[in-house]
């Protein structure tokens, strides 16, 4: 009898164990479902809360607009078409009437030219140790294997100069003779830091003046290349026409919109004289 009791008790235990497992699994499932439902409720609540706020804001905006219209009945008309009309008027004023061929040939429009760069050479008449200068001064570049001269860059006035060991100097970048003199004075001051004192006043020789401007008329470069001598024009490589004016000893770069670059002159008077001569020759070409 004792043996049968033991067998029954073991079966019961197994059945109870299975029941307890089922209960635990059901509890887990129910807890997961609760979590999911809570998340879903939260999302729904958020949506419900956000939507009425947005609608309220829109309604308030509409009310304010209506109130403004009631207060200012003159502003009921939409301002956008007025702005468009104003823009069209501005465009109309900006657009200038088309020039006739006679006006283009006669040189209608403002004519101007200004100096852009002056290239100058001078001699300090003193030997200069370029290696020492390059080691002490920060605004210098010196590579004797590539080029025998030392490059010095000046901030004020914004110029640069080539200095050679013999004392010769080539300065470029200045737009007036006053700026040229200032830059040479700065070079002399920088040489004092090395222990070199320049007592003479160096003579300045202008080597080249570059000027740019506008002659005030459109140009047909193809016609000019055919009818003028001493011209070079290759539009596939460069859009400008090179014209050597032998009488004025100047070279011009001409562009179709009337812009001009002049080089080869040695004074401002020569620049203006060369420009006058250029305009005369262009008027003669038909």
Image: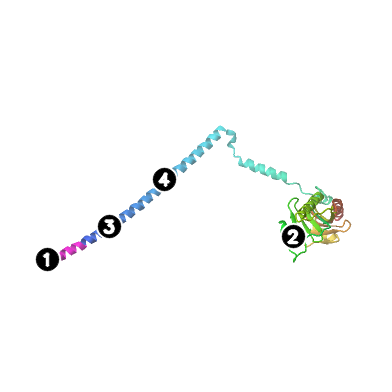
Of labels 2 and 1, the one closer to you: 2
Cβ–Cβ under 8 Å for marks 3 and 4: no
The tag earlier along the polypeptide, 2 or 1, is 1
Image x and y of residue 193, in percent:
75, 54
Question: Mark 4–mark 2 contact, CB under 8 Å?
Answer: no
- Characterize the local packing of mark 3: few (<14), some (14-19) or many (20 or more) Cα atoms within 10 angstroms: few
Which of 2/94 is in front? 2
Frontmost of labels 4 and 2 is 2
Which labelled disc corresponds to residue 24?
Answer: 3
Q: Residues within 10 Å of mark 4 (few under 14, many from 20)?
A: few
Q: Residue at x 27, y 57 (%)?
A: 24
Residue depicted at 13% across the width and 64% down the height: 5
**On-image quarter of the C terminus:** bottom right
* Disc with the residue nearer the chain's start (1 vs 3): 1
Q: Main secondary structure of the magenta part?
A: helix
Q: Secondary structure at mark 1?
A: helix
Q: Which residue is mark 4?
A: 48
* Range shown magenta: 3-14
Using residue 125 as the reference point, say whether residue 152 is left or right of it. Answer: left
Q: Nearer the viewer, residue 267 or 22?
A: 267
The disc placed on residue 2 is 1
Q: Is residue 103 above or below residue 9?
A: above
């Amino acid at each position: 009898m004792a043996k049968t009791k033991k067998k029954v008790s073991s079966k019961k235990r197994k059945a109870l164990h299975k029941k307890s497992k089922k209960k635990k699994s059901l509890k887990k499932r129910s807890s997961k479902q609760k979590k999911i439902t809570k998340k879903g409720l939260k999302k729904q609540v958020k949506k419900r809360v956000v939507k009425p706020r947005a609608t309220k804001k829109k309604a308030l905006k509409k009310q304010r607009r209506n109130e403004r219209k009631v207060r200012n009945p003159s502003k009921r008309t939409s301002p956008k078409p007025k702005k468009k009309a104003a823009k069209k008027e501005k465009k109309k004023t900006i657009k200038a009437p088309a020039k006739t061929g006679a006006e283009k040939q006669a040189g209608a429009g403002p004519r101007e030219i200004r100096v852009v760069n002056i290239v100058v050479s001078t001699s300090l008449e003193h030997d200069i140790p370029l290696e020492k200068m390059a080691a002490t001064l920060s605004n210098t570049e010196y590579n004797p294997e590539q080029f025998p001269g030392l490059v010095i860059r000046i901030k004020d006035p914004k110029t640069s100069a080539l200095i050679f060991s013999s004392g010769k100097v080539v300065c470029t970048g200045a737009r007036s003779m006053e700026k040229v003199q200032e830059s040479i004075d700065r070079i002399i001051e920088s040489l004092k830091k090395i222990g070199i004192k320049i007592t003479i006043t160096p003579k300045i020789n202008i080597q080249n003046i570059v000027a740019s401007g506008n002659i005030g008329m459109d140009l047909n470069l193809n016609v000019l290349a055919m009818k003028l001598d001493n011209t070079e024009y290759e539009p596939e490589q460069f859009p400008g026409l090179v014209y050597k004016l032998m009488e004025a000893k100047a070279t011009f770069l001409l562009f179709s919109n009337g812009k001009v670059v002049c080089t080869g002159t040695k004074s401002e008077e020569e620049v203006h004289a060369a420009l006058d001569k250029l305009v005369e020759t262009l008027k003669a070409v038909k």
